[in-house]
Image (tube, helix red, strand yellow):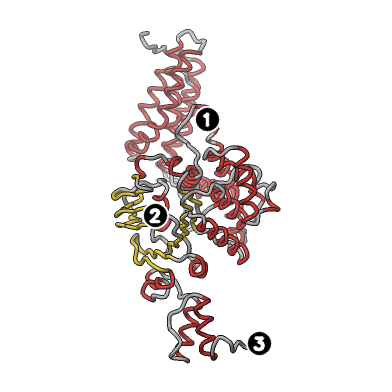
Amino acid sequence: MIIIEDVHFSYDGLYTALRGVSLQIDDGESLAIMGTNGAGKTTLVKHFNGLLRPQSGRVILNGADTKDFSIAEIAREVGLVMQNPDHQLFLDTVEKEIVFGLKNLGFTEEEATERCSRTITSLGLEGLAQRSPFALSGGERKRVALASVLATEPRVVVLDEPTIGQDACQKQRLAEMLESLNERGRTVVVVTHDIEFVIEHLPRTVAMANGTIVADGQTNKVLSNDEILECCSLTPPQLTQAARSLHEEFPTFPERLTLLSEVESEVLRILGGENSVIP
Amino acid sequence: MSIVLATISLLFMEMLVLLVILALLFPILAASKSLRRWSNSMKSLSVLLGFIIIFNTLLSTATNPFNYSVSLALRLVALMTSFSLFFLTVHPDELSQALIQMRVRFEFAFAMSMAMRYVPTLAQEAYAIMDAQKARGVELDKGSLLKRIRNIIPIIVPLIIVSIRRALSIAESMESRGFGASDTRTYMEKLAFRRKDWMVVVLSLIALLTSIYIRLYVPIPNLSLPF
């Protein structure tokens, strides 16, 4: 469990990135952090593993204040994947790159190899295991960076913009992997602008703007609220827009819907019941 | 001029001369209001200076090792000061403009000012990389000296790769914005040589020639420390 208590942070004392952020993330939750560029999302998640220390306020991880621990100690509990994969890849094959993180955290040789091959399969990196990370495309490098942290299966997984440069198929793979981690009780935190990804895969959303949290709650509630969307400079998801147009035509159609399944059943209802699916 | 001073400090080993050069440099630094930045850079240099003094004293074969190493350190300070005088007072754009007017091809002058422009970016990048590696459990500030040295690899390799990648993408983006499209460029500002500048040049040349003469023909009193 991570508890953030009224955390303030400013870079160089000039630019204030966080102005009093409080947040509680329970074990086994999976949530999205969304918000404008420069809202403080990355600054906030860097507090989760101690890369940044709060200038005032506290960060409590599993009941202990993070200020008493080194980053390497926290890294066992909280795995953070940064935005730019090039900042962490340095070995000559993808496989070594993934094993490196595992060994750092004290896994045995066998366990490391085992976990490595499992992660490679679940992220679809099979053909690339012996290639050099530097010869891969941007999206592939991004996945290698993700794999190197996901393989360690920390209790809290924090991903900063994991879907950048990923095609729909890879996004789906990533989502499946996050879901399986989540099912095994791991906490998943995703910083992203990818509204469709959030709606489909992350039940809770924290919206940030200007270094504060402006909304925190169920994803479909948060993301169907126009004020919040505007505040975070997000456009309403396509499904919400579609629901609105349908609402204008059919007043019985609910105006705010974000989930595909909800829209589906409502459309079916309007068309005349579950059974009248047009062949 | 700073180049002349630097050359002079390379010519001489004697402490007296080096002290004279430093004494000349300080008023100039003060006049350009860069004393504080200079002292900051000297702070970071002081570790190296300490090493020079200690190792040379222990290992040198000169007759008076301590004396010798102190003058070596002084020489480095003089050298660094004369160069930092140049880089603290000349804006990179002015430098490239000057080079262009000296008929250096624009591409080379531009490369030079780009190189200077990207030093801070590189530093930022290095911090970001250190963060990313720490998040993977690399302990940068723990362990034996050997382990710490080995820990540099996860930092330095990405740094080089990122720099190369950036260089390539900058080159591509510059070309796509038409870099080098026309042969004759026009400039917003032109630098002109005034009388004052000529005086500095002449004075520097005289100083250089005199010091070469002194070096070759005049014996200099050897100022040695009393131990």
Residue plotted at (35% across, 33% down): B39
Q: Amino acid at mark 1?
A: Lys
Relative to A123, is B90 on the left or the right? left
Q: Nearer the viewer, residue B113 or A233?
A: A233
Q: Chain of mark 2?
A: A
Residue with the mark numbered 3: A279
For the residues beneath circles 2 and 1, the answer to whether they share a chain is no
The quarter of the image holding the C terminus of chain B is top left
Residue at image location 44% in from the left, 40% down from the top = A73
Badges 2 and 3, same chain: yes
Callout 1: residue from which chain?
B
- In the drawing, does residue A130 fall left or right of residue A3? right
Determine the CA span between mark 1 and mark 3: 68 Å
In the rendered image, is residue B106 in sight? no
**Mark 2 or mark 3, which is nearer to you?**
3
Q: Kindly identify which residue carries mark 2.
A: A44
| Crowding at mark 2 (Cα within 10 Å: few <14, some 14-19, many 20+) | many
Tell me which corner region of the image, top left, top right, bottom left or bottom right, holds residue A29. bottom left
Label ID, residue B147: 1
Q: CA distance from mark 2 to mark 3?
A: 50 Å
